[in-house]
Structures are given as C-alpha cells and as structure tokens.
Image (tube, helix red, strand yellow):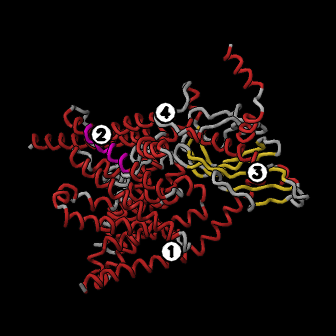
C-alpha cells in the first residue's frame, strides 16, 4: 500500500466523511459535552481510543466468527456487548494503572457505550468489507475527525457564550446554526484530497493502448514528438 | 465471587434467549431476503440486456466463470453455440452519502448497452432516473454528469469506466 | 398523572427531540424525505413500545428484578438490540428500498438515548400498561418531530414531498412561480443542522413569549390585590 493511499483513507474519513458533520454520528455528545474545551477534548480522546479498539475487536469477530458461522444477523447485539464490555475493561485498567488519567477522562467513559459514533463506525467498517489495515486507518481517521470537530466546536461555543445572542436562539439553537456553518466548510474539503494516480482514469482501452505504444507508436504520438522537436 | 458468577450467568441466559429468538426470526426472513435479491438481479438483467430478454430459451447466462476484484459480479451472456455475446457487470462505487450499485451491460463492440442503478441512498439529486447519455457509447467522452451532485456523478462515472475497461479483458 | 396526560406528554410537553434533545443523530441524518421519516418512526415506535413492555414485565417480578439489578443496563441493551435486529430483518425482507435508504441508522436505534432512557427512567418503575402508553406517546412524539423536520427539508431542498414509495406530491410549481430552483442546501448535511436549529429556536421563542405572558398575568393579579 502506497503512502498516498494511507493519506487518502485517513483524510477522507477525517474531513470529507467526518463522523459528526457528514454522517451525523455521535451528535448527542457533540451537543452535550462541547460546552467547555477541556471536557470536549477529554471526550474526544476517549472516543478515539474506544473507536480504534472496538472497531478492531468487532472487525475480527465479524470476519472470523460471525461470517464463518453464518451468524451475521447477530452483529448488532454482539457489537454492542463488545463495546460495553470494552469500555468497562478500559475503565478498570485506567483506574488501576493511570489514576491521573482516570480523573480527567473517567466520567466520559460510561457515556461512550451509548455514543453512536462507536457502534456506527464498527458496523460500517465490518459491512464495507475493508481489509484489516484499511479498517485500522478508517477507525483512526474517524476518531481523529471526531476529536477535531469537538475541539473546534467547543472553542466556538466558548466564544459564543461571551457574545450577545437573540434570546430565542441562545443555547442549543445557535450551536446548531454554528454546526451548520462548520458543515458547509467541511463539505468544501472535497478538492483537498485527490485520489492517488493508480485510480485515475486512463484512456480506454487501457490494455490495448499499452501494447500499441510499445510496438508501433501511433500517428498521434509521432505527431506530438515532431511538434515538440520543432 | 459467587454473586458475580450469578450475574454473569443471568446476562448470558438473556443473551442466549435473545440470540435464539433472532435465529428463529432469521429463519423466516432470510429466504424472503434471498428471493428478493435474486428477483431484483434477474429483473435488472432483463432491463439491461435486450438480446437475452428476446431469446430467453436459447441464450444462457454464465454467472460463475469470471470474477474480478473491482466488481461485485460478472454475468456473461452466451448464445446457443456458447459464443460470448455480452457481458453484464454489477459494479459499486462510493458516492456522496452511500454506496451506489449499478448494473451495466457491455456489448461485443465494447459499447455500453444500458445501465440501471440497483441500489443507492444518495440524498442529492435523483441518479436513479437521470440519463447519463452512455447508452451505445464506447468512451466516457459524452458522459453527462448530474449537475449539483458531483460526487455521485463521479461514482457513476467510475462504474462505467470499470465496466468498459474490464470488457476488453472478458470479451476477448 | 392520568392516562390521558401520560399519552399526551410525548407530543409537546416532553417531546423527546424538541424538548429533551434526545435521538438527534437519526433526526438529522434520515430526514431528507418524508418517507424516511415515516419508516424510521414506525421502526422506532415498534422498538420503544416492545422494549418498554418487556422491561416493565421483567421488573414486575420481584425476584427477577433483584437478580438482574447489577447488570440491568446490559440486559436492557441486549433486549433493545435484539428488538432492533428483528425490525431490521423484517424491513430488509419486506421493505428493501426503505431499508437501503435508512442504512446504518436502523441498527443505531440500539444506542438511541430515548429507548434506553425510557427503559431506565420509566418502564423499570411503572406498570406494563402505563409503560405501553408511555412508549406509544414518546414514539409518536418523536415521529411527529421527524415528520416536521423532513417536511421542511424535502420541500425546500427538492420541491417534492414523498409520502410512500411512488406516492409523491410534486410542488416544484411553487419554485417555478417564484423563478427559483429548489435549494439543495437543505438536503445537505449542513441544512440538517440549520433546520433543526431554527425549529428549536422557534420552539424556544414560543415558550419565551408564553412565559412572559404568564409573568405579566401574575403581575397584574398582584397589582389587583
């Protein structure tokens, strides 16, 4: 896999198909925990960790257990149980070994079980038939996208608190309008990520073209060379 | 410790009951879903392939022999002598909000005969009814994109490109 | 609370989307057409009513209630997830088009805060019949909210209103009359945030003016005294 492809997957899952702004996953925590920058970043970081771990585990279970035994229809129930127990395990581990981290992130962990970004990314990664490495990149990109938007949005909301807003718009309504403007900005990132050269269209028929180039140069090709020499 | 064991047991009993219930429901719905998809594929084949529709008794559709990584499935249409007449691709590409799945038939002259969108949940524009001006063309020069939905159009274009490209290999 | 009050509370007073601000993810994602809103609403009502019924039934047996107490949230989630899967399978079998356009959001009813919230806060403490009424009320209230948002978005963004399948009201004439084209902004993701924001602002404005009127009335009463 080329470096270009890695960048492409991470950037497209982070910016173009941002979990919050274009896929509408995790809106509850997006609106609920974004009042202060500190809590937003804390929530974002825990979501990154849980998304990557949960997607890896669920991907393995989906491909090596559920598909193999023809039990794909159990995916929702299995995935949610995996996520819930994973969150529980992470909580216990952090509590025991890194108490300082637990103090700052601990309160967000139980909320993550019902964060639809985690379940949504896990389901999408398994259903779209990604390879293991692509799945890791996709999960990481989605998580980072969540963190990025949480950070920007909490910053904007902190600033909004200081400004005068019409009484009817204050609170959640104005936050949603701000989110809408953010979504407009992010939907314009389409041009920023270009697909790598390998996927670009070449002239049809691709195979026939290559052969003729090697054996006998076409008239057009010769014309071009002559023109350039002149 | 004993208490933990009991609670774990209770949870697994619940999970087991639910799993069994789901498998019962699945037994009823799975055949319906399968029949539906098959019916949809068959209907789409009728729609995109005129020769097969008119000569159902003599022509055959080979669903197994060719497999590509780029496409979901390949159907070869053969006449009574076993000669390849057309090839039909089921291609999918990522669009704006969903994965677009198309069925595209390519004739022996490497021209696109017809195409249908099998499934898409695109929110912008109606790609299911839009005419991309590709019927009977052998290149993407005349591709008419759906204005206002660039990303969906790009995905559709990619589908056509893949189908045309692979036809050179499959219809040799 | 009487049964009638219990039934009516989900529509305006405790509307899950507009007042409690729960279940915002599907409300933004699938409201691009009225048909989607109907489909989501039906799936949602089924899951909510069934989960409320089952959970209040489980909790009405004292022994069972004590037994599941430490893992009750996990048990609720398992029950909800299997109900969601049943809906998903039935929809895939009999309404494949709707299933395609709702996509991953059917599975995500599992983590919709409304369902789990009602299970924990209401169904586990009330009788079966009350819980069923609560489920229907909340479900209908949520569906109503989805319908309002999707009506605005589909009309402004596409110029149509899709009721079900091919049954579609074409209102593009309105746009032609005004010499404009439908504003596709409203079907995009940014439009979803905007519409929900504005609807919430209108709700808040109505509430504010009501409060102000009440205050005024109280003041006058005091002055009279």
Residue B119 as seen in the image, left or right of residue C216: right
Kindly indicate whether the residues beneath marks 3 and 4 are on one polypeptide chain.
Answer: no
Asked which secondary structure carries label 3, the reply is helix
| Whole-number angstrom distance, CA of label 1 to CA of label 3 | 42 Å
Which quadrant of the structure image shows residue A36?
top left
Q: Which residue is mark 4?
A: A191
Q: Earlier in the sequence, mark 1 or mark 3?
A: 1
In this rendering, is residue B156 above or below C49? above
| Whole-number angstrom distance, CA of label 1 to CA of label 2 | 42 Å
Q: Where does residue C199 sit, x and y in percent of width and height? A: 37, 41
Q: Residue at x 60, y 55 (%)?
A: C97
Q: Where does residue C128 sit, x and y in percent of width and height? A: 36, 74
Kindly indicate whether the residues beneath marks 1 and 3 are on one polypeptide chain.
Answer: yes
The secondary structure making up most of the magenta span is helix
Q: Which mark is residue B22?
A: 1
Q: Which residue is mark 3?
A: B170
Asked which secondary structure carries label 2, the reply is helix
Q: Which mark is residue A152?
A: 2
Q: Residue at x 55, y 72 (%)?
A: A68
Chain label for disc 1: B
Between circles 1 and 4, the one closer to the viewer is 4
Badges 3 and 4: C-beta atoms under 8 Å apart? no
Q: Which mark is residue B96?
A: none
Residue C64 as seen in the image, left or right of residue A198: left
């Amino acid at each position: 896999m080329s470096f270009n492809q890695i960048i492409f997957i991470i950037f497209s899952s982070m910016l173009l198909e941002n979990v919050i702004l274009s896929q509408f996953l995790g809106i509850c925590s997006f609106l609920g925990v974004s009042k202060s920058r500190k809590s937003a970043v804390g929530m974002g970081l825990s979501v990154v960790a849980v998304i990557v771990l949960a997607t890896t585990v669920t991907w393995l279970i989906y491909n090596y257990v559920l598909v193999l035994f023809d039990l794909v229809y159990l995916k929702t129930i299995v995935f949610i149980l995996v996520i819930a127990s994973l969150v529980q395990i992470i909580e216990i581990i952090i509590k025991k070994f890194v108490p300082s981290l637990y103090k700052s992130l601990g309160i967000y962990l139980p909320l993550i079980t019902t964060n639809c970004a985690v379940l949504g990314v896990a389901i999408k990664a398994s259903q779209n038939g990604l390879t293991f490495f692509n799945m890791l990149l996709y999960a990481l990109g989605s998580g980072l996208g969540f963190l990025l938007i949480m950070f920007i949005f909490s910053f904007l909301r902190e600033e909004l608190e200081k400004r005068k807003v019409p009484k009817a718009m204050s609170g959640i309504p104005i936050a949603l309008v701000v989110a809408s403007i953010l979504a407009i900005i992010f939907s314009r990132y389409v041009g920023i990520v270009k697909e790598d050269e390998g996927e670009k269209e070449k002239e049809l028929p691709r195979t026939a073209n290559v052969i003729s180039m090697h054996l006998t140069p076409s008239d057009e090709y010769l014309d071009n060379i002559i023109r350039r020499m002149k | 410790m004993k208490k933990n064991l009991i609670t774990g047991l209770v949870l697994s009993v619940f999970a087991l009951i639910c799993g069994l219930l789901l498998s019962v429901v699945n037994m009823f719905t799975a055949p319906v879903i399968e029949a539906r998809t098959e019916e949809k594929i068959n209907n789409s084949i009728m729609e995109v392939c005129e020769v097969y529709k008119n000569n159902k008794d003599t022509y055959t559709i080979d669903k197994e022999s060719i497999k590509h990584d780029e496409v979901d499935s390949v159907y070869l249409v053969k006449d009574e002598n076993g000669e390849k007449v057309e090839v039909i691709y089921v291609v999918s590409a990522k669009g704006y909000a969903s994965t677009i799945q198309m069925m595209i038939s390519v004739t022996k002259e490497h021209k696109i005969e017809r195409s249908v969108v099998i499934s898409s949940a695109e929110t912008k524009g109606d790609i299911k009814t839009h005419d991309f001006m590709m019927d009977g063309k052998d290149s993407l020069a005349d591709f008419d994109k759906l204005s206002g939905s660039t990303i969906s159009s790009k995905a559709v274009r990619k589908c056509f490109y893949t189908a045309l490209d692979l036809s050179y290999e499959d219809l040799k | 609370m009487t049964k009638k009050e219990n039934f009516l509370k989900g529509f305006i007073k405790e509307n899950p989307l507009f007042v409690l601000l729960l279940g915002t993810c599907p409300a933004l994602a699938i409201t691009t057409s009225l048909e989607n809103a109907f489909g989501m609403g039906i799936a949602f009502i089924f899951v909510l009513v069934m989960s409320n019924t089952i959970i209040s039934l489980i909790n009405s047996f004292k022994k069972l209630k004590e037994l599941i107490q430490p893992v009750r949230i996990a048990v609720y989630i398992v029950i909800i997830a299997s109900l969601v899967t049943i809906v998903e399978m039935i929809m895939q079998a009999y309404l494949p088009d709707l299933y395609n356009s709702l996509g991953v959001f059917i599975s995500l009813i599992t983590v919709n805060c409304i369902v789990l919230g009602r299970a924990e806060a209401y169904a586990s403490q009330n009788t079966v019949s009350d819980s069923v009424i609560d489920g229907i009320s909340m479900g209908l209230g949520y569906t109503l909210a989805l319908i309002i948002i999707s009506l605005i978005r589909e009309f402004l963004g596409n110029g149509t209103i899709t009721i079900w399948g091919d049954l579609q009201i074409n209102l593009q004439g309105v746009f032609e009359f005004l010499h404009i084209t439908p504003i596709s902004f409203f079907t995009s993701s940014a439009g979803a945030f905007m519409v929900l924001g504005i609807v919430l602002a209108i709700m808040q404005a109505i509430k504010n003016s009501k409060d102000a009127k009440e205050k005024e009335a109280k003041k006058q009463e005091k002055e009279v005294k």
